[in-house]
Each structure stands twice: as structure tokens, then as C-alpha cells.
Amino acid sequence: MRQSSETLEITTHGQGLYEFTSELGRFMAMSSVREGLLTVYCRHTSCSLLVQENADPDVQTDLKSFFARLVPTGMEWIVHTTEGPDDMPAHIKSALTQTSISIPVIDGRPVLGTWQGLYLFEHRDAPHRRQVVMHVLGEG
């Protein structure tokens, strides 16, 4: 069994989707794992991970608009406001999505579809530095 891991830092500039598929590909190219399972994990509670279409930017626009309508900032019933009015809505959005993704690895490459990319989905308004851990385990 072989394994490799790396922590990627992603700088965000407010709410939106930040693609890091190419960084994932670079990580896999440096790995000695040819067949296995790749786990990607976000170390934060106010952003999340998505496998999503990377061909049409309208998909990102629509996703961001949908989540803004689903969980708007300024809901009067929210109690947790210590870190600002966008913090609890960000936690809710993160709870509705995912902070960990597993992707099969075949021939040393993550098995993503033709139009799929891997994204950090930032739910906060302010810029942040986010950490995403990539870990692959398998055979060489």
C-alpha cells in the first residue's frame, strides 16, 4: 500500500466557487499511487467542497444565487452572530453540502467526468485562507 498527502491553501475573495482541479492533478502526478482512493477534506465549517461542472460559468452563478436565496444573510431567528451576520448562514450552507469528497484513482489520475471540476465553495463574504487536505491511498 502506498499513500501520499498534501495540504493545499486556497485564498478566497468572498463568496463563490474556487476551482482547484489542476492542483489536484498536480498532486496526483507527484504521487506514486496508480490505483486507489483519493480523499479531499476541507478543514473549515463555513465553506465546503463540490464536484461540479467546470465548462459553463453560469452554473457557478446559479449555484451561488440558489444558496443565497436558500439561506440569506440577516435571518432574524439566527442566534450565532459573534463572527458577523454571514457566519451562521455560512455554517448552514456548509451543513447542506459536504466537507469531504472521495474520488477513485485509476492509472494515477482522479476519475472525474469530462465537465467535472473540484471546487472549494466559500460561504463567507470576507476573504479567507482555507486549507484543503488531499490524501490518496492505494497501489503503485
Image (cartoon, helix red, strand yellow):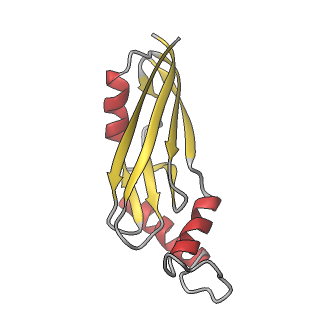
At 40% from the left edge and 54% from the top edge, which residue is drawn?
130
Split into 4 quadrants, where in the image is the C terminus?
A: top left
Residue 107 pos. (x, y %): 43, 17
Would you say residue 20 is visible in this rendering? no
Residue 104 pos. (x, y %): 54, 27
**In the orientation shown, which residue stands out farthest toward the bottom?**
76
The image quarter containing residue 134 is top left
Is residue 48 depicted above or below 134 in this figure? below
At 43% from the left edge and 62% from the top edge, which residue is drawn?
60
**In the orientation shown, which residue stands out farthest toward the front?**
82
Residue 42 pos. (x, y %): 50, 48
Instruction: Please state if 113 lies on the left or on the right of 6 as rendered.
Output: right
The image quarter containing residue 89 is bottom right
Q: What is the count of numbered marks?
A: 0
Would you say residue 88 is visible in this rendering? yes
At 53% from the left edge and 82% from the top edge, which residue is drawn?
73
The image quarter containing residue 30 is top left
* Residue nearest the observer in this picture, 90 or 59: 90
At 43% from the left edge and 50% from the top edge, which residue is drawn?
119
* Residue nearest the observer in this picture, 9 or 139: 9
**In the orientation shown, which residue stands out farthest toward the right?**
77
